[in-house]
Every structure is written in structure tokens, then in C-alpha cells.
Amino acid sequence: MISAPLALINEFLGQPPNASEHGYQIDHIIEFSHWFMGALFVGWSAFFVYVLIRFRKSRNPVADHEGVKNGVSTHLEFAVVLIEAVLLIGFAIPLWGKFVNEFPDTKDAILVHAIGQQFGWNFHLPGPDGQFGRRELALVSNTNPIGLDPNSPEGHDDLVVANELHVPVDRPVIIDISSKDVIHNFAVPSMRAAQDAIPGQIIPMWFKPIKTGSYEIVCGQLCGLGHYSMKGMLVVDTQEEYQEWLKERIELGGGPVQPPTEERVADRPEGEPPPGEIQGTVLPPGAPKVADPTGAGTPVPQNQPPP
Amino acid sequence: MDPSADLTSHAPAAHDPHHHDEHGHDHHELGWWRKYVFSTDHKVIGIQYLITGLIFLFLGFTLMMLMRWQLAYPGKALPVLGPMLNVLFGRGSMPEGIMAPDFYNSLGAMHGTIMIFLGVVPVAFAAFGNYVVPLQIGAPDMTFPKINMASYWAFFVGGIIMLISFFVPGGAAKSGWTAYTPLSVIADSGPGHHIIMNGQTLWLIGFVFLITSSLLGAVNFITTIIQLRAKGLTWMRLPFFVWAQFITAFLLLLAFPPLEAAAVMQLMDRLAATSFFMPTGLVVSGAALNISGGGSPILWQHLFWFLGHPEVYVLILPAMGIVAEILANNTRKPLWGYKSLVFAALVLGFLSFIVWAHHMWLTGMGTVVSAFFQTTTLIISIPSVIILSAFFISLWGGSIRFNTPMLFATAFLPMFGIGGLTGIPLAFNAADIYLHDTYYVIAHFHYIVAPGTIFALFAGVYFWFPKATGRMMSEFWGKVHFWPSLICMNVIFLPMFLQGMLSIHRRWYDGGQGWALSNEKVWGLSGFEWNVPISIAAWVMGLAQIPFIINFFWSIKYGKKVNDNPWEATTLEWAAPSPPPHGNFAVVPTAHRGPYEYSLPGRERDFTMQNEPIRDSDRRAYEAAAAAHD
Amino acid sequence: MNESNSPAASESVVQAHPEHDDHHDVSKHIKKYLMVGGLLMIFTIITVALSYFDFGSHKANIAVGMLVATFKAGLVAAIFMHLSAERHLVYQILIFTTFFVLVLFWLTYLAWYDPVVR
Amino acid sequence: MEIPYTTTARPDTGLWNAKIGIWLFLASEVMLFGGLFSAYIFLRLDAAPGHWPRGLLNVPVGTMNTAILIASSVTVVLAWAALKMRQFSKYKFYMGITILCGIVFLVVKLAYEWPIKFHHFGAKITPAALEKYEPYLGNAHLREGGYEPRVEISGHLENPEALHDESIREYHIKLDAANAEPLNPDNDRPRFWPAPMSDKIAHVSKDDVQLASMYVPKHSTFFATYFTITGLHGLHVLGGVIVFIYLWLPVSARLYKRNPEQLANRVEVAGLFWHFVDLVWIFVFPLFYLL
Ligand code: HEA
Ligand code: HEA
Ligand code: CUA
Ligand SMILES: [Cu+2]
């Protein structure tokens, strides 16, 4: 149910195509506000340029004490108020309501917990039983980054994957977002979805992918020296591919693919640059600049400064 | 009086034989230190603020030019300079000339902090406010000269602490100018970091000094404007600049203290291991933190943005004030809609306290709160529209002189317009889901603060320079400063909107190189590749400032000498000698009319100063004007 | 802030009211100060006592405690700080300040109260 | 040109400069403490059950300190009134008392209340181990009465070296009354007179402890806000006392001879500040000590 792809300005400004059901609405707001801004900009610019030329000193040596006497500006300001009100009440507020209030029925949805950490995402999936296992702080370790209790009845079949999340197309995805250490932001630009990952809080977010492909998950909040490379992948599969992926994961027995290694600046000896962080995620000259964008299934470039 | 002495000179005893200090008993001449360094004269303090603030602006700019290297050429060694900087800032900042991610983050955080709190606030508010406001209201000085001095020195100490923080182990603060917790609390701590002498702690301590400075300044400004207005200078006869400073002072007075409280709490979190901003169950580097927990990271954001949003109007209101003065002067006609300007500015000031959470759309805000903040944010755009419209309309019917101050002031209008307009999509939280923390936001606010505020500051420097020194800055070199600056600013910041729409996020050390999204093409270059022209423009912009700096210092000594009112302006500061002596006015001025009586019909000159008594011919003109409006 | 001052154009210099704290006046106030001091002491004891009384819920106790404290603070402000007979201008400053403090309290509360939940 | 209106009122505003100045300053102070109190509200609302301790502060001492501050507020207006009536020796007398009150307040705070806290110890039990320490916590009993649970065992730490020594695996705590007799209904709610410490010593394993801390700011968000707010308040008291001492010293006599009204104005300004400090305390006292 995609409405007419109206996003002219957005495309003109380089926004990547939308891949979620609600995304076009967000694009519309951006679009409309840009039309509005554009009209004001063009109108005032024309006025501005005209005035600067028409009333320059050489052309108009004596100024008029009064200047403009009519009330055009009042009408203009009134129009601005009106348009902003329409955008606000007609679009923005209802859409936000939809985004944060009208969560889809959990029975149809894919449920995921996303737990951010410096510098990567852990995804916790409920496994075949559809129930999330218990997580406990005390159990957190390098091999168990989210502190999942493997002995809990719901937890033994849970899946934990690092950085790459697969979901099937055309089904709503509900992600409960949280963080272990600092604030991150779980942003999937192509899905027009983003939400802060705040330690001590669990904030739900949802979207419904409508196009298969793999999409970058951006960390949109400064979270330390590896912030720029805190990349995840959201792979939208067809239903069959998704089932296959799930099966594969279950056979692997859950657990993280690659436990995110951690490296804190604070702990390194004074003055010593962190190992390899310079070469880091900055690709060597000559290397392809883009991490394989179609690379569904290929290992995701690891989060933190690699060795 | 001899204006050829240096910038801060005034002719003391001659104009003011009865000079008393506060206690009114000693008559001796002030020594050099009391006169130029620990001075209580608002003009000297204003100039101290100006010079210190400009130096900090330049420093903030320099940090940015370094960052722009990394953004354009990530991972490449900065030739020549890089290894030297590595020595200067300590091993690990730029090993072999390649910028480390930590150092990049330090530069970013300190660029923001320095530009805003050590550059623009001191120059726009403190320097111009100190120098110009008492003169414009016909006052001999600030109400509390000693507090005024204390304010400058608190600022100075705060600035020095911020500078020192670059050279401590681990480097300067690196958690952004917003210092979001818990990142900022765990940053710069642990082995290798001194408990006090580390970046983030020094940042906080420096901040407390800066806040104190602003508070002292604000108290002084407000009292001065209320109490020391000259006879006849009613509220509706105040120059708009004075209004702008008055409102700005209130913003500082009431918005800064909650941040001071927050800074103290963050200091406690860092020094006394409290958990004001630290929730339960943090695991950092695989180990649980030994703290009580129970705090809230969101609390910090609320307190920060409670200041943060009023702060952005602190950055823009004085700039609008400066532009208003210069527009009226160089169109040779009154500001259009003076009353609505004042009213809009008051509303702006008031509303700026209740919009702050628009910086926090993505922190898990429910519909009620977000609807409230969206509404207030949109409402606050209306007074800005009114102000800008009034400025534009003021141009109509003028006889526009394009001197250097006017060029900068006119350029301010569309630049602020672009910045302000692009705030609107950000105000819709649904749109901000996509735009949050991308370069779109960076472009939005830089259009306001860089070609906006900074241009207004340049305009103000060129405009009031003859008042402070008795000499003009060179017009030619002023224009050489203006045109490249205007072009570079736009080449720098326009492409950032594209980058933002491509979802290149801010505070990315690699400029987006490692991201597929950033490498999409738009307008011929990929988002990442756009960094190169941007950076080049930023460096050229640096070159474009050289004429200004030279012009500034050269003109202090060798500029063309001019009379007391070279711009043929109307407000009271131009009735004082240039430079004004201690105590400012030889004769206490009385205001008889509004601030912008340009091109009054029936007058031989096209400007009528505020202290000129009303004549019969004026009366007739006023009546005619009143009739025309009915 | 303009309303207060616009009428007070210095061209038509408004005669200041006689200072409220005239010498004789002050001696009259002394008793009042002592009484207010006594009242504050008594209410301090009342606050303490009330806190050991169960008003049904802890919230109710907090509300009562804050009510009494606000009353006491009001006394200090009105009498000791002469706010009961202060100039217009001071009120204006304080009205805005009070409003913004309440905004700070109320909105941080609201933001806490209205999270995104599923 | 002199700066006008330093002692006389400007006709249209009816105020002299410093009076406006101090009120503006107080407005900013309202916002400063407002920021701290809004943090208090936020943190308290957010606190997990049992994690906002009550009844840990000494109410009689707090009440006494409140009374002292109120008394000083009275004497400071009296001092100002004395000046207005041109009774200088009376002024000196009242001002002297004010200074004394301020100093006593600070001494009680810094030499008694705070240090006593620093020597008190508490160990917060992990959720998993609450059951194990039920004999010290009495949570079943509390639940019945509708009270918040107890999550901490507190008292005097008998083996302080345990705080730093990793090899010692237990804390030996000489228990507070509440942990010694958790079922005693007297301990359900805070008391006026602090209950004496018991002789019972409990051994608490480090494995069961979430956070062990003396009663320092680190202990909990309660103590964090308590120490921060009372600390900042104390700094204000200190500042006020210093100003008062300055206004009491011989300088004031000289100023009095030259311009008594100016001295009265200065005292009024300092007094306004002092009343504000008192006013803050009026809220601090119930919020931290009582409620
Ligand atoms: C001086 C600085 C300043 C000013 C004045 C503004 C003004 C506005 N700002 Fe901006 N803003 C910042 C500085 C400023 N901002 C900064 C620094 C940040 C980022 C902070 C950080 O995260 O680090 C930010 C971020 C920011 C955000 C958060 C974005 C995010 O983080 O995701 C939002 C959201 O609502 C916003 C909105 C607005 C709005 C609606 C206005 C409105 O007030 C604007 C109103 C103005 C207009 C509507 C213009 C009217 C003009 C015309 C009608 C004429 C046009 C004519 C021509 C162009 C010729 N701003
Ligand atoms: C007032 C505020 C201000 C100003 C003026 C500027 C000016 C500039 N800023 Fe800044 N910027 C911020 C405030 C400001 N910035 C903030 C708050 C952030 C966010 C930080 C964060 O993420 O935490 C930021 C972030 C920021 C980024 C994003 C970094 C990142 O996210 O990784 C970039 C990127 O290019 C940038 C660029 C620039 C450039 C090119 C300028 C140029 O326009 C600079 C132009 C400067 C001048 C023209 C000054 C020249 C002065 C003189 C020449 C005076 C000398 C005279 C004498 C000594 C007499 N800025
Ligand atoms: Cu995680 Cu940025
Ligand atoms: Cu804002």
C-alpha cells in the first residue's frame, strides 16, 4: 500500500529510496515542508534582490521615511502560521502517534531485542518458542554479551546475533531497543526509522519493511571513538530466505556469531594509541569504498577498531 | 582629544575632573594595570571581551580546519603540520600525522564549545553589550563596574581551563559539546587519567566558570538597562540592539543556572562516583560499573537543553540587534515595524524556555509531550518570521549604501533565512526521525551561527570600530574580506544539506567513507566526496580572514581618522566622543525622540539624532506620518 | 517587561512613592518580624509532627509537607524579604522566574510520565 | 559622570541599583536550586522500590538547625531595622548573632551531621540474595504493612579493610536497629529520635552485595542529592557569613559615619540573600529529613 511516490524534493536532495510501509509518510512531511520553505525562500529572495537593486543609493538617493505602508506582511505571517499548523496537526502529530502508539499486533510481528554496546549491536531473538529468555547483568561476559540465562526455560533456544539482523519482508518488526553502556541510536535510514538506545530504558520501535535487500543500521548518537564505525546490517529476506536463515542460526545453537570485542579508550596506557585504531575501519587506499551493499549473509564488517 | 592613542585609550581627567571610584574618596590617577587590565570601565572590558572572544573564535575555527582534513581525506596523514601537532597535543593525537578517532572527537566537542561559549557569547553578548549598550542608553558605565570586571575574569579563567584541557593526558573533552551522559561520565576516567586534570572534568570546571561569568554579566546588563537609561529614553525609544541585549541577558540569567546545577551533578558523578546520570546495570568494557545506579541519562539531556535552546537565541538575538542598527543606518530610514520587532523578540525570549525537548525527539518521548514541544517549536518560528520580514521590508524605500558593515548585515538576512527555514522540518518529530543527527542538522544551525551570527559580528566590528578608536577600518579590505567569506560559507554549508539527506551522520570520524549510504551519488559527487570541496572552501575561508585580521590591527594605528559620527547615525553612542572618555559623555544626554529618525521630512540632514530637541517642523512631520497610517 | 516602564517615561517623571521603609515605619514593623519568626518556629514543629502522622499515603504526606513548607517560604518572602510591599518590577522578574521553574519541574515530570511503551 | 541611583531610588522604577541586582541574582539562584530540585524529583520518581531510603538523617538535629537558620533570618531583619532607625550598636549586636547562627549551622553540618554519615556503612543486597538475608530485612513483614521493601543491611562496618581488600569475602556489620529487629513495628517508619545501634553483628557475603558503600554521595541517589544540595546550600551559608562578617567589621562603622543609608542598603541586600538561603532550607529540611 505505497501511495504515489511523491518525494520529488527528497530525491532531488539525494535521499535514498524508502523501504518501509510508513516511510513515505515521513518523506511527505519532509517534502511538504521543503515546498513550503522553498516558496518562502524564493519569494523573499526575489523581493530581496529587487529591493537591493531598486533602492541602492545611486538609484534612490533620498530614502522614504515611511517605507511600506500596507499590511502584506501580516497576511504573509498569517499564511505561515496556517501552513505550519496544517503540517503539524494534519501530518506530524498523527504520524508520531502511529509510530509510538499504534504498535502492530505482536502475533503477526517479528519481535527482536536490540542491545547496543560500544561499538556494535546485539540482537536477541526469541527462538522457536517465541519467548524471550531471562537476561541478567551478572551473566554478561565476552561470550555472552547480553547476559542471557541459557538455563531459563524460555532462554535455552534463544538466538543472539551480532550486528546482522534478518527479517522477512512485509511483516511488521518490533524492536525493543536498549543499551548496555552509553547512549546509541538505532537508525535505519532506508526504513525511515530511528530510536535512541538508552541504558536503563527499553524503548520499542517498529516498522514494516516492504522491499527486500540489505540496509545499513547506523548508530546515530556519539558513543565514543568507534561511533563512526558502529554499523549493523538489516537484511530483509523473502519469507523462504528468512526461514532458512533462522534454521541455520538455530542449528548453530544460538549465541553470538562473533562476540564483539571491546576496547575502551580509558583503559589504554597513557599516550599509547589504541591498537590499530588508525588503520581501523578507514579502508586502505584502493580498497572498494563501499562495504558490499548486497552482501546478505557475508560477515558484517566488525564494529570496533579491528586489529 | 587624541584618538591616535591606542584602542583602549580614553582621555581621563580632562573630561571628568570629579571622577570618583566607588567609595568616592580617592582622586588619584589609575595605574596602567587598573586602567587596561583590571579595569572596571565598561569600554575597556568590552574590548577585552572582543579581543579574547575573537581569538577564541579563531581557535575554534582552527580546530575545525583540522577536522575538515580528516573528513575530506580520512586516514591520510596531514602533511607537515600533522606530525607537529602530534608533538603539540601529545603522542596519540595524530600519530604520524594521521588523526586518531579520539582526537577527532576532542576537536569536535571543543570546536562546538569554544565557538559557542568562548567565541560567540563573549563577542556578541559581552563585548558588544558592554561597549555599546551603556553608550546607547546614555549611561556613564555599567551599574556594577566591579562585577563587570569579575565577569570578564571568570570568563578568562574558564577559557584558560578549557585550553589547558587540550594538554592533559587523554586530551580534551571528547563527548560532544552536549556531553551526553553516560558517555561523558565514563570518558577520560580510569588508568592514565588524573582525577581532576582530565579533559571532561576540566571541561565541566571551565564551564562552571563560564556560567558564573555569564550570570554576573546578565545581572549587570539588566540592571543597567533598567536603571541607567538617559532622561527621555523610554522603553519604546530604545534602539533595537538594546532590546535584543536585554532579552538575551534574561535568557542567560534564567537558563544557565539549571545547566550549572547539571554540571555540578556531572562533576559529582565523575569525582564522587555518584549516579545522578548513571542508570542501574551499566556494563562498560564487559565489566559492571561499581556505582549505585538509579540515575537517569535523560535528566542530563533535559537540563542541558533547558539551557541549550535558550542558548541558541542568545547566539542570534544580539546578532539581530546588530543587524537592525546597521540596516536602519544604511537604508537611511527607520526600521520597519519597530514595535512588532520588540514584541516578537520578547515572545521569542519567552517561548525559548519551553521548546527545549525538540532536541530529544528520539529519546522515547510519548505523544503528549512531543505534541506539546512540536507545537511550541513551531510557534517560536513565527516571531523569527516576523523579525526577518520586518528586516526585509525595512529595505523598501531606502537609499541603500553598501559599505562593509552593510554588506555583512544584508548577507545575514538570507543566510539566517536558510538556517531558520531548515529548522522547520526538524521541528516535526516525524521528519526528524530521518534527519536527526545528520549533517542536515549541522547545516541548519551553521547557516544560522556562521554566515548568520558571525557575519553580524563582523558587521558590528566594522560598524563600531570608529567609535572605539576614532578611526575607520579600510573599506576596500573589508570588501575583500566579505565576498570570499560569503561564497565560502555557502560552498561549505549548502552541500551539507545533501549529505544530511543522504544520511551522513554527524560526529563521524571517517566522513562517511565506510558507509554505503554515504557513497550514493548526488549532484555529481558521492556524499562522501562532497567533503573535499567543503573542506577546501573551509580552508579558503581561513585565508579570507587574513585581510580582516590585518585590517583590524592595522586600522587601530593607521586607519583613516574620522569624526564622532562617521556613519551619520542617530543613536546616542554617536553623540559621545570617539573614543569616549571614562564616564562617556561630557554632557549628560537627554533623548527626545525614537532611535531611527532617518530622512525625517522637512530636515536638512537625513538623520536626526536622538538627543536633538523636537522642532515645530518635526511635529508637523510626525502628524503627517500619523495621518498616513490611518 | 515593557509594560511596567512604558508609562514611566522619564519625560513625565513619575514621583516616587515615599519609601515604604521610612524610619518610623521600621520601628512599627519590628513586632511583626518577631511574630513571623515565632510563627516559622511553630510551623517547623508542625512540619515535623505532621510527617509522623499518616495521611493515608506517602504521597499525601509529601503533599502536606510541601504545602506547609510553601506557606513558610511564603512568609519569609513576603515579610522578611519585603515582597508584600515591593515594586512592580521585582514582581515581574519573579513571576517569570517562578513560571520557568515550574516549567522545569513540570516538564521533566511529564517526560518521565509519558514514555513510549508498547 | 557618577553612576546614578547607587543609594537613591530611580523615580520611575522606585528602586536603587543593587536592589534590582540582588533580585535578579536571586532569580538565577531560584533556577539553580530549581535545577537541583527537579533532579531530585526526577530521581526520586524513578527510584526502584526500596532504593530511596528514608529515616537515615537525624531529625532532632535537623530541626535544631532549621530553628537556628530561622532565628538568624529574624536577627538579620532586626539588624537592618536597627540601621534604619540609626541604632548602630543594636545593629552590631543583631548582626553578631546572625553571624554566630550561621557559623553554628555550618559547624553542626560539617563537624557532626556529615562525618557521622561518612562513618556509617550499608550493603545493598542483590535481588537474588534478598531471600537469604530475610532475617535482617523483614520484607515479608513490610509487604504486609504495605511498606517499601528493605534492600540494605546497614550499621557500623567492623572490618573496614574489607572495602578494599579483595581477599576478604565478607562484611561484618554491627547492625542498625532496623536490621537487628526488622519485625519491630517501630522500625517500619522513620523515627524522630534515631534508634541506637544494636550489638548484633551480621556477616554479609560479598557475592550477595550489589553495592557496598559508606554513607557517602556514592551510596545512592538519595545521598547524592542530599550531599550535593546541602553542600551547595552550605556554600551559600558560608558566603553569607563571610559577607556579614565584612559588614560587621570596623569598615561598617566608617561607612556608617559617612553614609548610613548606604550601609543599610548593603545590609538589606545581604539580608535578602540570607533570607533566600533560609527559604531554600525550608524546602530541603522536609524533603530530605522527613518525607
Ligand atoms: C542561533 C542558533 C539557532 C537558531 C536561531 C535556531 C532556530 C531554530 N531551530 Fe535550531 N539548532 C541550533 C541552533 C539554532 N536553531 C543548533 C546549534 C542545533 C543543534 C544542536 C546539537 O545537537 O548540537 C539545532 C538543532 C535544532 C533541532 C534538533 C535537530 C536534531 O537534533 O535532530 C531542531 C528541531 O526542532 C531545531 C529547530 C529550530 C527551529 C524551528 C528554529 C526556528 O527558531 C527558526 C525560525 C526561523 C525561520 C522560520 C526563518 C524565517 C525566514 C523567513 C520567513 C525568510 C526567508 C527568506 C529568505 C531565505 C530570503 N533546531
Ligand atoms: C557559534 C557556533 C559555531 C560556529 C561559528 C561554527 C563555525 C563552523 N563550523 Fe561548527 N559546530 C558548532 C558550532 C559552530 N561552528 C557546534 C556546536 C558543533 C557541534 C559539535 C558537536 O558535535 O558536539 C559544530 C560542528 C561542526 C561540524 C561537524 C563535526 C562533526 O559532527 O563531526 C562541522 C563540519 O564541518 C563544522 C564546521 C564549521 C565550519 C566550517 C565553520 C566555519 O563557518 C567557521 C567560520 C569561522 C570564522 C569565520 C571565524 C573567524 C574568526 C576570525 C577570523 C577572528 C579573528 C580575528 C582576530 C583575532 C582579530 N562544525
Ligand atoms: Cu553507538 Cu554511536
Ligand atoms: Cu533548539
Image: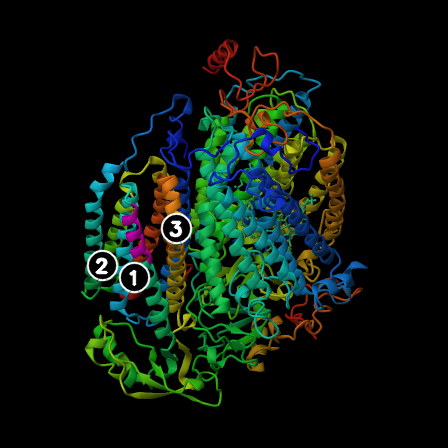
- Where residue B515 sits, quadrant-wise, is bottom right
Kindly identify which numbered label has been placed on residue C44: 2
In front: mark 3 or mark 1? Answer: 3
Q: Amino acid at mark 2?
A: Thr
Ligand 1 resides in the quarter of the picture at: top right
- Residue at 68% x, 58% y is B512
Give the residues in magenta.
Answer: D88-99
What separation in Å lies between label 2 and label 3 (alpha carbons)? 36 Å
- Where residue B201 sits, quadrant-wise, is bottom right
Q: Amino acid at mark 1?
A: Phe
In front: mark 2 or mark 3? Answer: 3
- In this rendering, the answer to whether A28 lies above or below B630 is below
Asked if the residues shown at circle 1 and circle 2 are in contact, with their CB atoms under 8 angstroms apart, the answer is yes
Residue B505 in sight from this viewpoint: no
**Quadrant including the C terminus of chain B:** top left
Q: Amino acid at mark 3?
A: Pro
Residue B232 is left or right of residue C46, and the answer is: right
Residue under pointer 3: D250
Residue D13 highlighted magenta (yes or no): no
Residue under pointer 1: D285
